[in-house]
Amino acid sequence: MEQKKTRGDKGSALVIGAGIAGMQSALLLAEMGTKVFLLEQGPAIGGYFPLLDKTFPTNSCGVCFMSPTPPAFCPIYECHLHDNIELLPNSEVMKVEGGGGDFNVSVIRKPRFVDPKRCNLCEACIKVCPVEVEREFGGGLEKRKAIYLPFPQAIPHSLVIDPKTCTRCGECVKVCSPGAIDLDMKEEEEKIEVGAILLGFGFEPFQARRKGEYGFGRYENVLTSIQFERLLSTSSPTQGLPVRVSDGKKMEKIAFIQCVGSRDPSCGQDHCSTICCMYATKQAMIAKERSPGLGVTFFYMDIRPMGKDYERYYERAKKEYGIEYIRSAISSIKELQQTKNLLITYVKEDGTFEEREFDAVVLSLGFTPPQTIKDLAQRMGVQVNQQGFCQTDEFNPSKTSVNGIFVGGAFRGPRDIPETVVEGSSAAASAASFLIPHRLPQPLKEYPIEGALGEEIPKIGVFLCHCGEELKKTLSLFEIILETKLLSEVVHVEEVGLACLPEDLDLIKKRIGEQGLNRIVIAGCSHREIRGAMEEMAKGMGFNPYLIEYANIREQCAFVHLDYPRLATEKAMALIRMAVERAKRSQPIRKGKQKIDKKGLVVGGGLAGMTASLQLAAQGYEVYLIEKEKELGGNLKESFYTLKGSNPQDLLNKLIKQVESNGSVHLYSGAEVLGFEKKNGHYRTKIRHQNEEKSLDHGALILATGGKEITPKGYLYGEDSRVITQRQLEKMAHLNDERLKDVHSVVMIQCVGSRDEEHPYCSRICCSHAVKNALKLKEKDPRINIYVLYRDVRTYGFYETYYHEARGKGVIFIRYDLENKPKVSLQGGSLQVSLLDPAMNSPVTLSADRVVLSAGIEPNDHRELARIFDVDFNSDGFFMEANPKSAPLDSVDRGKFFCGLCHSPNFIEDAISQGNAAAARAGSLLSKEAVEEKAYLAYVIKRLCCGCGLCVTVCPYGARVLNEEEGKAEVIGSLCQGCGSCVIACRNAASQQRNFEKDLNLAALDAVID
Amino acid sequence: MAEFEPRIVAFLCHWCTYTGADLAGTTRQQYPPNIRIIHLMCSGAVDSIYVLKALIDGADGVLIGGCHPGDCHYQTGNFKARRRVAILKGILQQMGFTENRVWLKWISASEGKLFADTVTKMVEELKKMGPNPMKQLWNA
């Protein structure tokens, strides 16, 4: 085994697991200027998400919004591109020595047997490989060879050999023309020194075979949800159509069985896996879109769409898509001999049995902690909970039991993508503030000053890269070279072998010098592949990288027209002509920089707001905290105990003390926001504080304006003092209120002001809130009778265990429908609750000493604040994020973030995660001395501008303003993202985009159309 | 006479469809070589002029590719493209383009196969439609 020397330093971080949480942590830390090692045990990074074609509740992908600097590519690719991130795929952590702030990590780099730098994905090796095995990606729905590409977008983008199945026959080595395969590659051990470690382990699907009664593995048309997800991907063997892989029969009726490996203590899975209801509903919707006649039936216990906008999604699935949901328990599944259809026998809520036949059955798998990391967690000393997920303190959700090791995402318990993104960010925030004292100044890369171009006539050099002979299989490079030499302004044409390798880059560099080239055209692979290497080379020699144009004759010609060499060559020529035309007109771009005001402003001094403020301060920034009330605390003041047994009042007092004593947090309580202005690179907020107007300049804005308990309507609330809310009950229970003395019977009513017409969303926390209070009352007096009237019990994640406990302690749960809401009435001075019990199908009357209403949560009325800060809110009044999936806390405008109840109803620990995460997002912006502008900015030819303001209206980023004095439009460089909307909107062609000018695009068009 | 080979000009957005076309390449999805791709930052940055000029200069079809609704990297660029194409179709009708020669398609970065299929289908459809009627004017 080879041993390399130690790399890294105390200021760098190691992220283990490159799934969504890991990538999010890595990207944020890297943006903050921290060196990040991103380690992944598999051959490619990305975790589960490359499997997902579409995500809920948007039914789109949108994962690209995850990057801290939008617009961006898919995070997999962004991690690959980032200067501060070093990928360690195919690696495992062997040993962790030292402690927080100074870890020494031994890493084993497993061999991939294929050199990613040399592999050009010609796939000749795949054709000759004799070994065929189940492909892991997609749950074994397809086959792969022993040498394979994990998935089409895999990064590192090269094939890999699976040593477990490879027979070492050597056939692949013989056919590999670039000589990329080396079957004798050895494991390497590396030592890495880091200050902090972040765990982004994620989760694993439950082994469907463990629930043998569902027939997975025996019945060919019983699929796991992982397989069905893969089936619905447009790149699947069925092209995304719901067709049986076994016999090619179109599915007409399918069934989803929920909670397979969830809420099931019999197989050691007593937790709720949180996301299965939603992902299964999404799969059902997509399947129905692809095959409109498809009948979909769900067999479920409770449906739990408790995230932001999830309830609406579920309602749409029922009403618009006609998906059937049957509350039931599965009794048996049998395969029918002839048709291979499946016969499901189930028990309905009222105890009657029914049978139904389906073409296929999908098992909605729950999630377990990854089995492979159990030992690793132990070796690191990280405590895990009973279920095997990471144990964290409720009020420090991103900290593990080991100082300096942080966690986010599904290793804390199954969670959806938005929560994972939030927690990945939160872990990054904790790690960033932890690393502050150890942080070493990052050596800045310095480049020579770029030469001036002036009015020089273009001298274009065209370099044709044949990608290790690969392009020559289709294209006639000889002809292309001859023809390219005839193009005007082209002074040099040369063939190169692999332009991405240093040898050829040096050659290009040499030619630029020798021939005095001032424009370059690279004809070869896509600019996405080669741009990084080319720009680095150009910057290194003082050549403006925007003077390089790319003709994509690999992905767009050679690889896709294998059967038409003649036409492909012609097409390649057209693309080169276009690139040369563009090169003639392209201008050097020097990216401007906007200095950043390194201060944050937080509006709202509740839990989320205080957390965000303290986190920003811990990262080393000044923070203004604006609170409209005299006192800090918000809703936290009304919370006295949590389900997991912590004391929120201790947290409140601690936070207030910290805020008040922190020199970097400037608190303005009893203050009012008057106005908000956007300047170049900073914001200015005007407030009134103690009858004095103040202007505060800052670079980032965090809105944490909170929410409140909905005031219940009906149920005699406000008329009879014995009808109270859960919150009031919590306070009484906490204070041992006299009024609870003679209470023997309590009826709790769920979904009061939730999931109805007025509030068509689930408030997420009320089910657990009821369970919490029920357990508290039972603890005080075990003989007390408690009835919980519910619609669906949504004690997701580990809260499920408390629901289980409550039922065990005799709390009675009775379901009701929205159509038959319980009625509260007075009978001879005592309270009575009547409802229809669906299990007995008969009316039930309960007498109650107290009726407790589980009132939902609504946001505070912040319409005025939304107007002032120019942010949007959704139809429920919660602030609207840039992307509900992957940028859950960001506003569309750069530098504005949300957290806490003003974003969505959430628990205390979620609010802490959100506060930390918002601070991380803000921190990634503030950490820079200046924001670098995007390259392809819009600009205004003032002479042509009539000041009509159309460009101001269409700009999605608020980057366009009208200069009132001049009557001309202007571009705020730091805000412009270069989409080109304003260029098209402008009727005078006064708006243009750098190197995408209209005449440039038209010239390109002329060149290809011939 | 040789079979009519339509000429397609495609304007593809940087983030989704162009990347999807790249994926079609790296996964060796085969499609006919009748298409020329022009790279723009966003489908919302496709000016009607580009489309009209392409058709006037003799392209038989124009493909505009953008991110799926909700996935636009510039928030709403693809919706702008959708509106623009809707209006453009009315104008094209008046110009005598009675067939559907301008296609607007949402193709994501992971849909290489969809890109290849779209091009294949478009070439088939354009073959049925025959050459761009503008070309006849040149010979008049």
Image: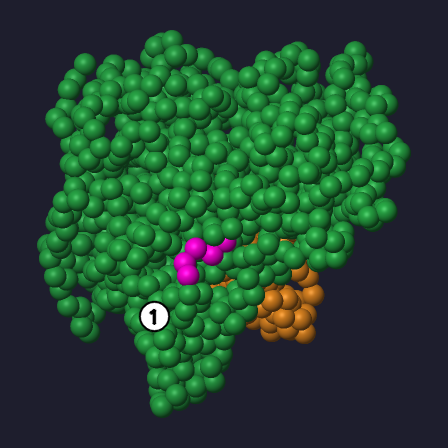
Chain colours: A green, B orange
Residue A345 image offset from top left, x and y in percent = 80, 19
Q: As rendered, which of B120 and A980 lies closer to the eye?
A: A980
Q: Residue at x 63, y 56 (%)?
A: A710
Q: Amino acid at mark 1?
A: Tyr
Q: As rendered, which of A275 and A664 lies closer to the eye?
A: A664
Q: Based on the displayed image, in which of its 4 quarters is residue A514 positioned?
A: bottom left
**Would residue A477 be seen by someone viewing this image from the given angle?**
no
- Magenta segment main secondary structure: loop
Q: Residue at x 56, y 32 (%)?
A: A799
Q: As rendered, which of A671 and A225 lies closer to the eye?
A: A671
Task: Spot the residue most to the right.
Answer: A842
Q: Is residue A632 magenta?
A: yes
- Say which element carries label 1: strand
* Part of the protein shown in magenta: A631-635
Q: Is residue A335 left or right of residue A485?
A: right
- Chain of the residue that carries numbered disc 1 in the rendered image: A
Question: On the image, numbered disc 1 is attached to which residue?
Answer: A683
Judge whether A868 appears above or below A363 on screen: below
Residue A962 image offset from top left, x and y in percent = 40, 82
* Pointer 1 local density, CA inside 10 Å: few below 14, some 14–19, many at least 20: many
Judge whether A785 appears above or below A965 on screen: above
Q: Is residue A781 left or right of residue A515?
A: right
